[in-house]
Image: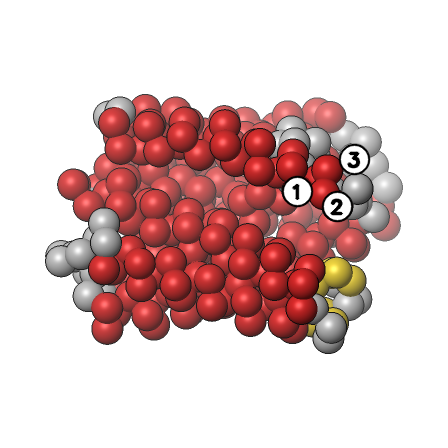
Amino acid sequence: MAAVNLTVRLATAAVAVPVILAVLFRAPAWCFYFLVLPVILVGEHELLGMTHPRDKVTRGIGVATSALVSVAFYFRPDDLNVVFTILLGLPLFAAGVTLLRLGAIETSAFRVFAFAYSPLFVALPLTLLAVMRRSLGSSGPGVVLLTLGLGWIGDTGAYFVGRSLGRHKLFEAVSPKKTVEGAIGGLAASIAWGIGASLGYLHGSLPLARAMPLATVAGALGQVGDLSESLLKRSTGVKDSGFLVPGHGGILDRMDSVIVTSVAVFLYTRWVGWN
């Protein structure tokens, strides 16, 4: 069964990766955003499907809200009015939606916070990928590739090292299959990706002295993103966030680490800058 699952995973990657690379490096920046936006909307639908399983109306409102948040931030990422409106408006809007769609009073507070949190967990971080692609000029595609690799290569390293060498449970209550050895292997893979990027396609714009700490921090935080999504699934009794990505589960199952690495790399470009 594990061999079949691995084959499906590899086949999915063989189809998806060339498409992503072609759009990222060959197409205009706005084309990449049109690739990212559907991913955001599906991810939002999956998240609210876990927290609002019987409320299709609220899920629809949540998806529409995330679309508006993503579009507003993509076009005005430096506008503090947009940022403050999102951060201050989401909790109030979430409370209003929950009052209109009250349902079981025992879960109402949970649903308020889940609705308000979901665009901040899914829409904004993934929109950062498209923002970096557009705003960093000729370095944009490479920075996005760095970000994706820090998450996905880290996941791959953790998967293979955990399967072959994993003995000690990492966080059994949250994710029973994850091991300490897998986490170390995943972090090593992320660091190796960062070093390779510095010496290769980002040579001259990401010095090795900066690439290593960035990859270390982003790779470690990417694993936190993975565990956070596992926590959400475990607490809501869901095995996979969805079934859209063969061999991987749902969009969130595939993007959970990238959600966090995108934030880490974006903040690096803002606080440290990018040559």
User: Residue 234, image x and y in percent?
Assistant: 78, 54
Any part of residue 19 in sight: yes
Pointer 3 with pointer 1, Cβ within 8 A: no
Return the residue at label 1: 6
At label 1, which amino acid type do we have?
Leu
Any part of residue 80 in sight: no
User: Residue 144, image x and y in percent?
Assistant: 33, 45
User: Residue 245, image x and y in percent?
Assistant: 62, 32
Front residue of 204/127: it is 204
Question: Marks 3 and 1, how far apart in space?
Answer: 30 Å
Q: Is residue 224 above or below residue 70?
A: below
Identify the residue shown where x is 66% and y is 47%: 114
Identify the residue shown where x is 27% and y is 40%: 141
Return the residue at label 3: 53
- Element under disc 1: helix
Disc nearer the start of the sequence (3/1): 1
Return the residue at label 2: 2
At label 3, which amino acid type do we have?
Pro
Disc nearer the start of the sequence (2/3): 2
Say left or right for 130 vs 112. Answer: left
